[in-house]
Amino acid sequence: MAKRLIPCFNRVLVEKIIPPSKTNTGILLPEASSKLNSGKVIAVGPGSRDAEGKLVPLCVKEGDTVLLAEYGGTEVKLDEKKYHLYDDHDILGSLHD
Amino acid sequence: MAKRLIPCFNRVLVEKIIPPSKTNTGILLPEASSKLNSGKVIAVGPGSRDAEGKLVPLCVKEGDTVLLAEYGGTEVKLDEKKYHLYDDHDILGSLHD
Amino acid sequence: MAKRLIPCFNRVLVEKIIPPSKTNTGILLPEASSKLNSGKVIAVGPGSRDAEGKLVPLCVKEGDTVLLAEYGGTEVKLDEKKYHLYDDHDILGSLHD
Amino acid sequence: MAKRLIPCFNRVLVEKIIPPSKTNTGILLPEASSKLNSGKVIAVGPGSRDAEGKLVPLCVKEGDTVLLAEYGGTEVKLDEKKYHLYDDHDILGSLHD
Amino acid sequence: MAKRLIPCFNRVLVEKIIPPSKTNTGILLPEASSKLNSGKVIAVGPGSRDAEGKLVPLCVKEGDTVLLAEYGGTEVKLDEKKYHLYDDHDILGSLHD
Amino acid sequence: MAKRLIPCFNRVLVEKIIPPSKTNTGILLPEASSKLNSGKVIAVGPGSRDAEGKLVPLCVKEGDTVLLAEYGGTEVKLDEKKYHLYDDHDILGSLHD
Amino acid sequence: MAKRLIPCFNRVLVEKIIPPSKTNTGILLPEASSKLNSGKVIAVGPGSRDAEGKLVPLCVKEGDTVLLAEYGGTEVKLDEKKYHLYDDHDILGSLHD
């Protein structure tokens, strides 16, 4: 079974971050507040090409924590693990502490 | 929990300005007059790219007060604070005293 | 309250000219004849960009009297005054005596 | 009241030619034959811009007699005279004796 | 009445060839076989422009016999004669003995 | 009656290959297996033009055996023979022994 | 009967990998887990062209194992073997151990 996927073009492979429904001390988090559609970038494609055929770098890189649009993303199962493949246009931005 | 969002491409992170419903002296403002869909720019992306792959600067910058189109904008919650993420094409212009 | 709006891209801020319904000598003007959808340009954006990222100058400038398309235009209230914000493609032309 | 309109972009101001319903000697012309949707060019815009921002000259000029597409054209009244404003793509060609 | 039409852009003025329904010796031709939607090129426009504003030559020239797409073409009457005005994209090719 | 068609732009004139329904030794071929939508290239156009007006060579040439998309293709009768005219984008590839 | 297909433009000929429904030791695999829409690249076209007419290399090459989008792909039978022809935009990425 294949372990690694190298995305094509401007696609980004993301492992979604499932926000904890409880705080460390066990208090139930209100459902809405914990819902940030985010994930970690596992792999990125080489980028799409501009009108002159040059590669256009992506807006995020491997290891980034990213905010995802509500829609978009294709579910991909590799070695029983669930990932999502996004066009980089559906990545809203990168999250930083 | 992440505190900062760096938008991708030509996106603009805006904190909406909620117009006061009363004047300083407490007089109720007529509902219509106080409704200017505006906000403060918190962060901007690097810009989108032109046909030759060069970055196209955005029309507004961090700290600007901006007039927003009636539609567009994706709600984003960071640290329990509500922001909106706009494409720069949905920013109508910058407001100045 | 903000007094000035600098439009983004190729947008044009226009103050509509309300045609008089009577002549100077008080004669009622037939409704149809007075209806020229025109206005005065209050402010213009920097312009949109061509495929090479260069700014494309607008077709009209501040102070011009312009003929407006029947549709298009977003109503904007600044300091209780009503303006309309147009894409420059919805400006049909400039009017001259 | 404004007397002259300078069109924007690739727009063409046309005064439609109303074909005579009778010959000079008073003979009624069959309705169909007299119906050539044509007009005289009163004013032209500077042209639209190509991908490199250069102005693209229009296909017709002031004074030309032109054949008009069946559709398109915005009616404009200037000093009680009726004109039509066309995109130059809706001008089929120029008519010559 | 105008006698000549110079088409705009990439338009082609065509006089349709009405295939004979009988052979020279008077034998009735089966209806289907005689139906080749073709015509003779009367006049061509200067061509449309590429992204750099350069004129793109048309694929056919005055005097060519051409095969026409089933659809497209605007009927134009000049001096009581019926012509059709095509975009050059609706000209399928040129016919040669 | 015209014998030759020179296609315009990126069009390809194809004579469809009707697969034999029997083998050489007369055995009936199962209907599905013989159904390869293919044909022989009779003539090609000069190609379409890129954004800089340069001709873009076609992907196939006269004499090639080609695999055709299920849809597309305009039927053309020349000298009682049936051909099909395709855009080169509807040619899936060339077939080789 | 033709044995080889050279795809046109940016098309990719793929032989789908039918995932085993049992492990080597005969244990039935849960239906969902074995369903990775993947295949082996048999042949690739020369690529499509950018705005300047230059060929744009494909994102995958002959021999790669690739992950396929759920949709897209045209079934093609060559010598009784079933293949699928994809636009390279419908190839999600390449799979590596």
Image: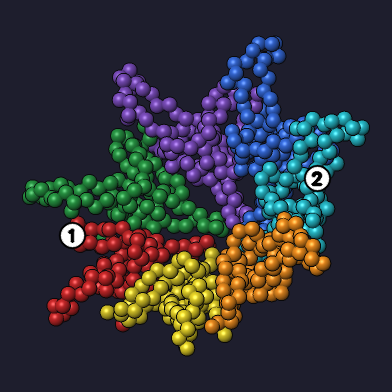
Chain colours: A red, B yellow, C orange, D cyan, E blue, F purple, G green
Q: What is the crowding at mark 1: few (fewer than 14 residues within 10 Å), some, or many (at least 20)?
A: few
Residue C92 shown left or right of residue E33 in the figure: right
Residue G36 shown left or right of residue E39 in the figure: left
Q: Amino acid at mark 2?
A: Ile
In the image, what residue occupies the spot 50% across and 82% down?
A: B64
How far from the left and from the top, in percent, is residue C39? 69, 68
- Of the 4 image quadrants, the one containing the N terminus of chain A is bottom left
Residue D41 shown left or right of residue F28 in the figure: right
Q: Nearer the viewer, residue D75 or E29?
A: D75
Find the distance from the CA under tag 1 to the CA under tag 2.
75 Å
Quarter of the image where one finds residue D70? top right
Above or below E70: residue G7? below
Q: Residue furthest bottom?
A: B25
How far from the left and from the top, in percent, is residue A88? 39, 65
> Can you see residue A4?
yes
Q: Secondary structure at mark 1?
A: loop
In the image, what residue occupies the spot 72% across and 69% down?
A: C65
Q: Secondary structure at mark 2?
A: loop
Instruction: Determine which of the numbered discs, if any, sits on residue D69 in the image.
Output: none
Above or below E36: residue D14? below
Q: Nearer the viewer, residue C89 or E48?
A: C89
Instruction: Determine which of the numbered discs, if any, sits on residue A80 in the image.
Output: 1
> Can you see residue E57?
no
In the image, what residue occupies the spot 71% across and 61% down?
A: C36
Quarter of the image where one finds residue E1? top right
Q: Which chain letter goes with mark 2?
A: D
How far from the left and from the top, in percent, is residue B60? 52, 78
Q: Which chain letter goes with mark 1?
A: A
Q: Nearer the viewer, residue B3 or E10?
A: B3
In the image, what residue occupies the spot 48% across and 33% down?
A: F40
Instruction: Determine which of the numbered discs, if any, sits on residue D17 in the image.
Output: 2
